[in-house]
Amino acid sequence: MFEKIYSPVHKLEFALFNNLFVKRDDLIDPYISGNKWRKLKYAIQKLQTEQKSHIVTFGGAYSNHLLATAAAAARLNLKSTAFVRGEAVKNEILMLCTLYGMKLIFTDRESYKNKIELYKTHFGNDKAAYFIDEGGASAEAISGCAEIINELPLAYDHIFCAVGTGTTAAGLLKGIQQNNLETKLHMIPVLKGGLFIKDEIAKYVSISEHLILHTDYHFGGYAKTTPELTGFMKTFIAKTGLLIDPVYTAKMFYSIVDLEQKGIIKKEDKILAIHTGGLLGILGMKEKLE
């Protein structure tokens, strides 16, 4: 299931940009979506090499990572369990996870902070179990995301990526460095206090002048939004026909427009936005988008 993908680069006609492109990782799979597919690719290969058959992972109640993991496990006839942060709830994402056979263990937020301890306590004696961190973060995920750069049809002046844990951005930076590109990589943290992401990236790849961090586009924090952002999102989708979500990709595209207006990037520059998928996250924001 990880051999072939469909992720073209499309040119967008939007605002004042002459050369705005988007890498359509959202088209890879409807449920193992975007960067989640790339993060799981080599982790699951490693799991199979080690002859494990039970994925144990972590995430919030609207986690696209949980859904992607559940779908991948079901297709590969693997068992899956997820520790879900917070009180027991029901929603569309978790319903799909359970339909794919994933067992959910709701965990209070304090206990959730120590994921390794949770894993050891519940599955330390399960020889078939395989640990995958929240969001799929791992060295294997970095390798999977680095392959995005190898797939690009040309070099770009700027690449933009919305980031949560920084895993995808670390892979992109690794790919840029491996290919000796001059491309600037713009990270858009979607949560408050995003400066820590640089430290997370440094665990996997050396920080270089290619990397630029913009911390002012979180719109209140993770899974938070404002009327300004949702208004931009609605206009963008209607004008481009490209569906984006308020948690990640809307914040990224908003930043591109804003940085052009501030003169930090130029409308003539070749700009690539990475569409990381995760569109089912819109379901958790439907009241704010009506």
Image: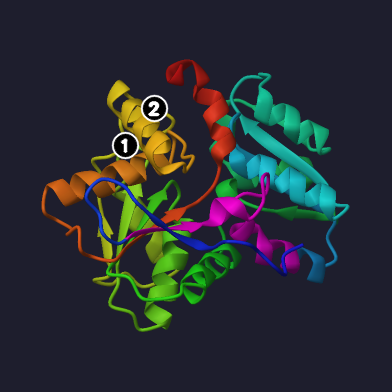
Binning the other alpha carbons within 10 Å of mark 2 as few (below 14), some (14 to 19) or many (20 upward) gives: some
Residue 228 x/y as whole percent: 28, 26
**Which label's residue is closer to the chain start, 1 or 2?**
1
Q: CA distance from mark 1 to mark 2?
A: 8 Å
Q: Quadrant of residue 25?
A: bottom right
Placement of the N terminus among the 4 image quadrants: bottom right
Q: Amino acid at mark 1?
A: His
Magenta region, residue range: 20-46
Q: Which residue is mark 1?
A: 218
Image label count: 2
Is 94 on the left-hand or right-hand side of 144? Answer: right
Residue pictured at 35% horizontal, 46% vertical: 252
Q: Secondary structure at mark 2?
A: loop
Residue 216 x/y as whole percent: 23, 40
Q: Secondary structure at mark 1?
A: loop
Q: Nearer the viewer, residue 148 or 84?
A: 148
The answer to whether residue 59 of the structure is visible from this angle is yes
Is 114 on the left-hand or right-hand side of 43? Answer: left
Residue pictured at 50% horizontal, 51% vertical: 276
Residue pictured at 33% horizontal, 54% vertical: 187
Determine contact: label 1, label 2, CB under 8 Å: yes
Is 91 on the left-hand or right-hand side of 199? Answer: right
Residue 103 is one of the magenta-drawn residues: no
Q: Which residue is mark 2?
A: 224
